[in-house]
Image (spheres, rainbow, N blue to C red):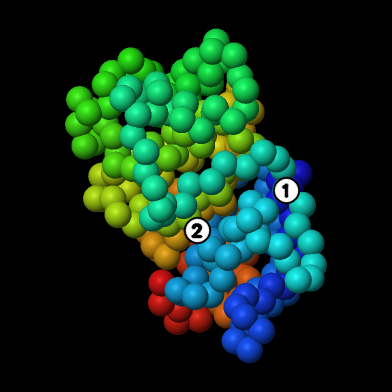
Amino acid sequence: MFSISVNDATLSLGRAAQKRQVLKGVNLQVQRGSLHMLLGPNGCGKSTLLRVLGGLLQLDGGGVEADAPSGFVFQNPDHQVVMPTVAADVAFGLGRYRLREAQVAAAVERALTLVNMAEFTHRATHTLSGGQRQRPTRRRFLRALAEEPRVLLLDELTTFLDVEDQFGVLRAVRDVTRTGARGRGVTAVWVTHRFEELEYADAASYMEDGRIVFTGSPDQLRQRLRGMGATL
């Protein structure tokens, strides 16, 4: 079963005189409960496609079907709020759902348990080590998990992390696709330019100039990229 299906998606961005076609007939299918990586050179349309999947941009043509709700974790957010305790920080995005206090507490506990941080629930945020905080990236990821999405949309999560933290976040995302909230696997689409991250993927696609030119297993994509002489 597919969690995401994109059919002949087209999109142009910019003002009328400078409008540029960013997506040029994109087709993509993502299996439910999988970690699907989207790779390609800068400016090829990866992040734009991610925003289309989340409903942040409307297509000019074609269509998208995706499980809902979606959780977003984008790099370089305009604002990063830090709450006084770990539980309050993870619960930050839940306010708009009008949940009861017990429901919020349960959602926070599930999110922290998924990434083996349940023991930090009541800790003051400022007392955590850098590794425990995993910098803003880990906090944004936990907030997204607390909302119990069926689809996670993840844009260049590891860009500003050191090597240990990079693979910690990758393992956490992979584990979430296996177990998910309430035992239901979550689908994750991970945009990256790092070739080495492919080992954590179930499947991967490669984009060039607004098109997906290949989709397959990580090993198949590696072989294809060698043949294409692509540079990530």
Question: Considering only vertical position in the picture, is 173 above or below 88?
Answer: below
Residue 211, quarter of picture:
bottom right
Q: Position of residue 164 (x, y in %)?
A: 25, 44
> Of the residues shown, which amino acid type is indicated by label 1?
Ala
| Residue at 48% across, 21% down | 108
* 130 displayed left or right of 8: left
Residue 115, quarter of picture:
top left
- Disc 2 crowd rating (10 Å Cα; few below 14, some 14-19, many 20+) is many
| Residue at 57% across, 41% down | 71
Question: Considering only vertical position in the picture, is 25 above or below 67?
Answer: below
Residue 85 in sight from this viewpoint: yes
- Disc 1 crowd rating (10 Å Cα; few below 14, some 14-19, many 20+) is some
Give whichever of 40, 122 is nearer the camera. 122
Question: Considering only vertical position in the picture, is 68 above or below 4?
Answer: above
* 118 displayed left or right of 26: left
Q: Position of residue 208 (x, y in %)?
A: 56, 77
**Where is mark 1, residue-wise?**
66
Residue 201 in sight from this viewpoint: no
| Viewport quadrant of the N terminus | top right
| Residue at 28% across, 50% down | 161
Q: Position of residue 39 (x, y in %)?
A: 50, 65
**Where is mark 2, residue-wise?**
191
Residue furthest toward the bottom?
Answer: 17
Secondary structure under badge 2? strand
Question: Considering only vertical position in the picture, is 164 above or below 106?
Answer: below
Residue 62, quarter of picture:
bottom right
The label shown at residue 196 is: none
